[in-house]
């Protein structure tokens, strides 16, 4: 956790780290990065990441968006971008 605005501006706390989630039943691993805002650009509460097939190492989905707002998943094989929560991520 980071604190911004200590010396000037509005005080704001921010998350910044990596998280790995594994599903042994499906052989999937998700690598999610909670991104911090840069000093001169960027946005608060941003995330990015991937979902991979653990056995083959193939990237199946790319994740992006904001953990406090809309997140989307991109199917890397077909390029389809879908908001998370409206459709379950499935293997085809």
Image (cartoon, helix red, strand yellow):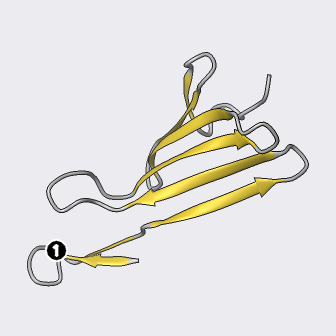
Front-most of residues 81 and 50: 50
Front-most of residues 27 and 4: 27
Task: Please state the horizontal and vertical placement of residue 78, each as a whole percent of the image.
Answer: 61, 16
Indicate the quadrant containing the C terminus: top left, top right, bottom left or bottom right: top right
Is 63 drawn above or below residue 11 in the view shown?
above
Residue located farthest toward the top when viewing the structure as drawn: 78
Is 36 drawn above or below residue 29 in the view shown?
below
Indicate the quadrant containing the N terminus: top left, top right, bottom left or bottom right: bottom left
Residue underneath mark 1: 10
- At a point 47% along the width and 54% down the height, the residue shown is 67
Task: Please state the horizontal and vertical placement of residue 66, each as a whole percent of the image.
Answer: 43, 49
* Neighbourhood count class around disc 1 (C-alpha, 10 Å): few under 14, some 14–19, many 20 upward: few
Give the structural element (helix, strand or loop) at label 1: loop
Is 26 drawn above or below residue 82 in the view shown?
below
| Snapshot quadrant of residue 58 | top right
Residue located farthest toward the right when viewing the structure as drawn: 25
- At a point 46% along the width and 60% down the height, the residue shown is 34
Residue located farthest toward the front when viewing the structure as drawn: 56
- At a point 72% along the width and 49% down the height, the residue shown is 29
Task: Please state the horizontal and vertical placement of residue 22, each as a whole percent of the image.
Answer: 76, 56
Q: How many marks?
A: 1
| Snapshot quadrant of residue 6 | bottom left
Is 80 drawn above or below residue 86 in the view shown?
above
- At a point 31% along the width and 58% down the height, the residue shown is 44
Residue located farthest toward the bottom when viewing the structure as drawn: 7
Front-most of residues 49 and 85: 49
Looking at the image, residue 2 sits to the left or right of residue 85; the answer is left
Front-most of residues 88 and 21: 21
């Amino acid at each position: 956790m980071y604190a911004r605005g200590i010396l000037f501006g509005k005080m704001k706390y921010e998350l910044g780290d990596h998280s790995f989630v594994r599903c042994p039943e499906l052989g999937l691993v998700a690598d999610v990065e909670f991104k911090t805002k840069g000093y001169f650009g960027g946005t608060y509460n941003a995330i990015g990441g991937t979902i991979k097939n653990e056995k083959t190492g193939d990237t199946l989905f790319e994740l992006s968006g904001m953990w406090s707002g809309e997140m989307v998943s991109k199917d890397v094989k077909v390029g389809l971008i879908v908001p998370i929560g409206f459709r379950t991520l499935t293997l085809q």
